[in-house]
């Protein structure tokens, strides 16, 4: 059984039909990416899965449970975590305080200490800057912090919304390396990206979204070589 | 940063100061304060306010300017002062030749008399011009002085003005404590004796001078103490503070204790609203509603008048009922506004506050709440058979409420719920993504805030023994919000500072009563420009209102 099964969901913003039947499966241990242009519905899909939006039709099952209608804050306790678009660090809190917010859902002190060490190994810069106010970090560091904070809830499924947005190329590499590392340590990843090339280079499989629908679904390697994907998203003529 | 100054700058600054004075004259502020003499035979509060603006403008204009000789900035100050007198002089001439009172009620012969120092129009205007010019030049001169001299000088003047301004209150205390003779020696009527004023100035300036020289040394010695000794010292300080708080009514006397009680009730409300606005970041403008609910529950349950239910409630048994009712209404208000943020929330809560007040006035509940006539004959609290009638006795009821509220607020701030509030204030979506239940978090904030306000209302009703709907105006909500902002949003000590400044001071400065709102407005504008984080800001909030640059500097 797949870890996450999204089956034909339709999500609306008022009368706007944003998702017109999206179906996605994510197997345990995978990196799956959703790529597509602006307004294709990638973020809406993530927000629907994480419970911030409720689909009007369709079903979502996570770890075998139907989670449609489960509020976002409860899904954190089911060990599903999301790093929102635009990073969303608590700008006025320090790095340390941000990370503390991340393990809000947990009680196991030993596990928390272990995970904090893990985040600091993954992002050594966060250790250096633990006393610094998050709003003063660079964009890349904020992305690292947001990712690290999500990891503090010890998720089995980590969803990232546009982690490369607005970052310098060298930092994009660093962030993606960290994502691969997190995945190797056993966390399943669902990654939404506009930077299709980067996303496909680390993912196992990918879905291509267009105006609220999935137009393509294949192994990442194959998608990279797909003519349509190359034209539309990879800038290859 | 040094700037060169052109003639145009000087004239325009002088005119700005002049227009400010002109408007103070026209609204009657100066005339009113002119009646309040500060130092016998010398000057009144009106004079201080009259000349404060050009002096401040002159001081700040010349402080950073380039100059070859000291004469230049002093000259600039002189010109600014002279120019700033012109609008007032024009006003004087207009007043003597035409009757302006039908348009400007406060432009009266009394004002002219005051502005011309009773010396006739021509000579008086000249004196006024000279007075402004010399005082402004003096301000510029003080700005040039070495910090070592400037600081004691300014402190001394501030002390004299402060003591003279609060003479009314001080007089009573001094008379009660040291006897009539001492009071008469210091104050003539309500004004300060010039010799005593000089003495105060010298003492204040002297102490400041001494502290500036030796203070650093003492601080270093203190810093050198062992942690144990420091702990002892801070313990000693807390002990002294506790004793002072406990015996405050003895120190203050009846009138000041009454003022303190009012401040205390505002502190109680401020602590509650601070949770809603400061901790949780929910802008609530209808906060007075819970205050009203607390007061009316207390009134209906305990009143010995016609409207009292007479079912055996005393102050102490009605108190929890009042608080619980307020909490219930806090939640009732909370539910419909769960999805709202910022401005929308402010408007809805504003409406809620008005609904409660209008219901209290309305005929619908006239039978139970008394309509516009309110509820009368609410008994004062009783404590082991003693009826607490005097302000000195009621002080302890208010004190109990405030201490309880401080304890709860502090514990909540540092609790898991406090962290939830903080995260929600920063970013609702991310807070939810961290596993926080926003619905419960918001409702807890509204409920806790309402509880404090309900408690304040209940004590208020019992203290006043009668309540009327018009006591629960929107202006109370605004006052409470303003005191939080002035003290520092999210800061518990800030609530105390804000309440003292916005509720305590106006009670003591009766002269300003008519212009209370004007002063509120000016104070808030100045605060936001120069000290946006408030007087006693919360550490974390301080970060929020400072710029990013400052932040990284402070943290590295």
Image (tube, rainbow, N blue to C red):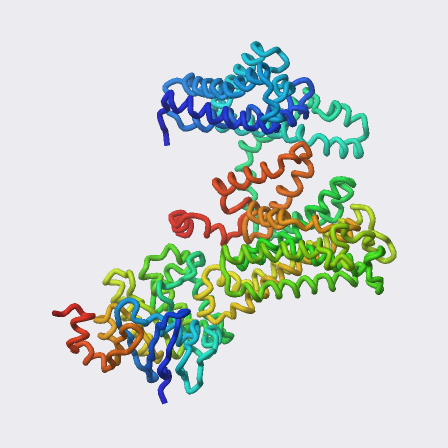
Residue B26 spot, x, y in % from top left: 58, 26
Residue B446, quarter of picture: bottom right
Q: Is residue B102 visible?
A: yes
Q: Residue at x 67, y 32 (%)?
A: B511
| Residue B66 found in image quarter | top left
The N terminus of chain B lies in quadrant: top left
| A180 on left or right of B482 | left
Q: Residue furthest right?
A: B385
Q: Residue at x 66, y 30 (%)?
A: B165
Which residue is farthest bottom?
A: A1
Residue A197 point in image, percent of width and height? 21, 71
B382 sits left or right of B282 in the view: right
Determine the residue positioned at 51% across, 68% down: B438
Q: Position of residue B173 (x, y in %)?
A: 76, 34
Is B273 placed left or right of A107 in the picture? right
Q: Do we see residue B274 in this rendering?
A: no
> Quick one: B459 or B375, which is closer to the camera?
B375
* Residue B35 on image: x %, y %: 68, 24
Tell me what residue is drawn at x 41 percent, y 60 percent: A130
Comparing B419 with B57, the one in front is: B57
Relative to B393, say whether A96 is above or below. below
Q: Is residue B138 above or below residue A47?
A: above
């Amino acid at each position: 059984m797949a870890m996450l099964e999204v089956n034909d969901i339709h999500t609306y913003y008022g009368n706007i039909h944003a998702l017109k039947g999206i179906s996605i499966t994510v197997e345990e241990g995978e990196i799956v990416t959703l790529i597509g242009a602006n307004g294709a519905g990638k973020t809406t899909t993530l927000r629907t899965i994480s419970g911030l939006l409720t689909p009007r039709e369709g079903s979502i099952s996570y770890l075998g449970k139907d989670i449609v209608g489960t509020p976002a804050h409860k899904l954190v306790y089911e060990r599903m975590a999301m790093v929102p678009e635009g990073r969303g660090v608590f700008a006025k809190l320090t790095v340390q305080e941000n990370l503390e917010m991340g393990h809000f859902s947990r009680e196991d002190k030993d596990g928390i200490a272990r995970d904090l060490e893990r985040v600091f190994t993954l992002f050594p810069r966060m250790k250096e800057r633990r006393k610094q106010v998050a709003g003063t970090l660079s964009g890349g560091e904020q992305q690292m912090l947001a990712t690290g904070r999500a990891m503090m809830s010890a998720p089995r499924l980590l969803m990232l919304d546009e982690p490369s947005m607005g970052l310098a190329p060298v930092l994009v590499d660093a962030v993606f390396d960290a994502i691969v590392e997190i995945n190797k340590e056993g966390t399943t990843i669902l990654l939404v990206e506009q930077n299709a090339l980067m996303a496909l280079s680390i993912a196992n499989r990918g879905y291509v979204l267009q105006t609220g629908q999935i137009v393509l679904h294949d192994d990442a390697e194959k998608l990279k070589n797909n003519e349509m994907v190359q034209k539309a998203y990879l800038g290859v003529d | 940063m040094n700037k060169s100054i052109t003639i145009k700058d000087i004239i325009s600054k002088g005119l700005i100061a002049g227009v400010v004075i002109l408007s103070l004259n026209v609204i009657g502020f100066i005339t009113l304060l002119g009646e309040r003499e500060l130092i016998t035979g010398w000057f009144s509060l009106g004079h201080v306010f009259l000349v404060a603006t050009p002096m401040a403008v002159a001081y700040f204009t010349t402080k950073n300017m380039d100059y070859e000789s000291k004469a230049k900035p002093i000259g600039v100050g002189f010109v600014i002062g002279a120019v700033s007198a012109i609008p007032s002089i024009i006003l004087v001439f207009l007043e003597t030749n035409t009757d302006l009172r039908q348009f400007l009620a406060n432009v009266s012969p009394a004002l002219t008399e005051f502005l011309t120092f009773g010396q006739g129009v021509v000579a008086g205007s000249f004196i006024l011009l000279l007075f402004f010019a010399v005082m402004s030049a003096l301000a510029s001169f003080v700005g040039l002085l070495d910090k070592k001299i400037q600081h004691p000088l300014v402190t001394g003047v501030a002390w004299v003005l402060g003591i003279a301004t609060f003479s009314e209150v001080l007089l009573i205390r001094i008379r009660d404590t040291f006897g009539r003779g001492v009071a008469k020696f210091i104050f003539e009527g309500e004004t300060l004796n010039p010799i005593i004023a000089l003495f105060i100035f010298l003492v204040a300036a002297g102490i400041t001078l001494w502290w500036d020289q030796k203070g650093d040394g003492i601080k270093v010695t203190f810093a050198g103490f062992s942690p144990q000794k420091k702990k002892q010292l801070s313990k000693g300080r807390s002990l002294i503070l506790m004793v002072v708080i406990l015996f405050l009514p003895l120190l203050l006397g009846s009138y000041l204790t009454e003022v303190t009680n009012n401040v205390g009730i505002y502190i109680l409300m401020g602590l509650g609203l601070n949770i809603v606005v400061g901790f949780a970041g929910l802008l609530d403008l209808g906060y007075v509603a819970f205050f009203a609910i607390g007061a009316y529950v207390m009134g209906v349950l305990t009143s010995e008048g016609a409207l009292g239910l007479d079912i055996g409630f005393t102050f102490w048994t009605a108190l929890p009922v009042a608080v619980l009712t307020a909490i219930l209404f806090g939640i009732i208000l909370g539910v419909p506004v769960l999805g709202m943020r910022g401005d929308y929330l402010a408007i809805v809560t504003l409406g809620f506050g008005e609904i409660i007040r209008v219901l209290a006035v309305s005929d619908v509940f006239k039978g139970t709440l008394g309509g516009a006539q309110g509820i009368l004959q609410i008994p004062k609290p009783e404590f082991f058979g003693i009826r607490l009638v005097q302000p000195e006795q009621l002080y302890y009821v208010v004190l109990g409420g405030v201490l309880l509220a401080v304890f709860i607020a502090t514990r909540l701030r540092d609790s898991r719920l406090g962290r939830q509030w903080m995260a929600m204030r920063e970013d609702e979506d991310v807070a939810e993504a961290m596993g926080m239940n926003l619905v419960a978090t918001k409702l807890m904030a509204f409920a806790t805030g309402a509880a404090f306000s309900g408690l304040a209302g209940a004590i208020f009703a019992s203290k006043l023994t009668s309540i009327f709907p018009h006591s629960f105006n929107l202006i109370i909500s605004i006052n409470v919000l303003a005191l939080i902002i002035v003290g520092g949003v999210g800061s518990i000590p800030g609530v105390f500072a804000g309440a003292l400044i916005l509720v305590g001071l106006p009670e003591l400065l009766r002269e300003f009563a008519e212009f209370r709102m004007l002063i509120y407005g000016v104070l808030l504008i100045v605060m936001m420009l120069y000290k946006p984080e408030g007087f006693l800001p919360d550490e974390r909030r301080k970060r929020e209102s400072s710029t990013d640059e400052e932040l990284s500097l402070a943290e590295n």
